[in-house]
């Protein structure tokens, strides 16, 4: 795993838990297992996933309550920037995909601009990861930070697997810990 991949995992920690929540209605609608959730139900599910994620992080990293409090504060401080970057990256990817679908009619100048924008967003992500790592280093040991990166990478992989399953076949199989529309975080 490269340092860039690890960095991407760190920058998305909170979003991964939310992605599980976001995936739930899609899997239910496509797979016929569970009805779409109301905004209140989704908010409750997201909160449960955040709590479960926090419990797993605290246990696996052996964080004290004080460290966990600081981790929550750090994540909250960086969350808006992470969300903004994810949204911008998504928009760029979709725009590139649209241009490439045009094949020979693709606007070369627009594609070049989108590539430069994507590279700029990657730089912003790395800057964000760097700033976050500096803050985490103030209260976590290097071993705890390394375990945190590993845990986040595993979560990212699970979310990507869920997304691929949903895109290919409506969430066939449902994934471990998610039978019948019940969702439980199990890294």
Image: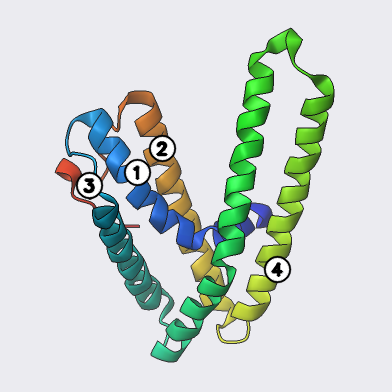
Q: Quadrant of residue 145?
A: bottom right
Query: Callout 1: few (<14), some (14-19), or many (20+) C-alpha neighbours within 10 Å?
Result: some
- The earlier-in-sequence mark between 2 and 1 is 1
Q: Are marks 3 and 2 in contact (CB under 8 Å)?
A: no
User: Is 88 situated above or below 17?
Assistant: above
| Mark seen at residue 178 | 3
| Direction front: furthest residue | 39
Secondary structure beneath label 4: helix
On the image, which quarter does residue 54 sit in?
A: bottom left
Residue tagged by mark 4?
Answer: 130
Q: Is residue 81 visible?
A: yes
Q: Residues within 10 Å of mark 2 (few under 14, many from 20)?
A: some
Dot 1: what SS?
A: helix
Say which of 46 and 147 sits in front.
Answer: 46
Q: Is residue 72 left or right of residue 49?
A: right
Spatial separation of the CA atoms under disc 2 and disc 1: 7 Å
Q: In x, y percent, where is residue 103?
A: 70, 11
Question: Dot 1 corresponds to which residue?
Answer: 23
The answer to whether 102 appears left or right of 32 in the picture is right
**Relative to residue 187, is residue 53 depicted above or below?**
below
Disc nearer the start of the sequence (4/3): 4
The residue that disc 2 covers is: 163
First along the sequence among labels 3 and 1 = 1
Viewer-proximal residue, 43 or 172? 43
Nearer the viewer's eye, disc 3 or disc 1? Answer: 1
Q: Label for residue 33?
A: none
Give the residue displayed 55% in from the left and 77% down from the top: 74
Q: Secondary structure at mark 2?
A: helix
Pointers 2 and 1 in contact (CB under 8 A)? Answer: yes
């Amino acid at each position: 795993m490269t340092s860039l991949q690890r960095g991407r995992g760190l920058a998305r920690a909170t979003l991964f838990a939310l992605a599980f929540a976001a995936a739930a209605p899609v899997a239910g609608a496509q797979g016929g297992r569970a009805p779409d959730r109301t905004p209140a139900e989704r908010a409750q599910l997201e909160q449960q996933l955040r709590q479960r994620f926090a419990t797993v992080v605290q246990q696996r990293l052996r964080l004290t309550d004080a460290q966990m409090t600081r981790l929550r504060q750090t994540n909250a401080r960086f969350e808006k920037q992470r969300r903004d970057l994810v949204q911008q990256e998504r928009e760029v990817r979709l725009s590139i995909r649209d241009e490439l679908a045009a094949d020979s009619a693709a606007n070369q100048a627009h594609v070049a601009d989108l590539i430069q924008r994507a590279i700029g967003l990657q730089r912003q992500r790395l800057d964000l990861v760097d700033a976050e790592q500096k803050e985490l280093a103030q209260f976590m040991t290097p071993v705890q930070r390394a375990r945190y990166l590993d845990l986040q990478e595993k979560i990212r992989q699970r979310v990507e697997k869920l997304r691929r399953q949903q895109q290919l076949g409506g969430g066939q199989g449902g994934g471990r810990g998610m039978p019948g529309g019940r969702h439980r975080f199990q890294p």
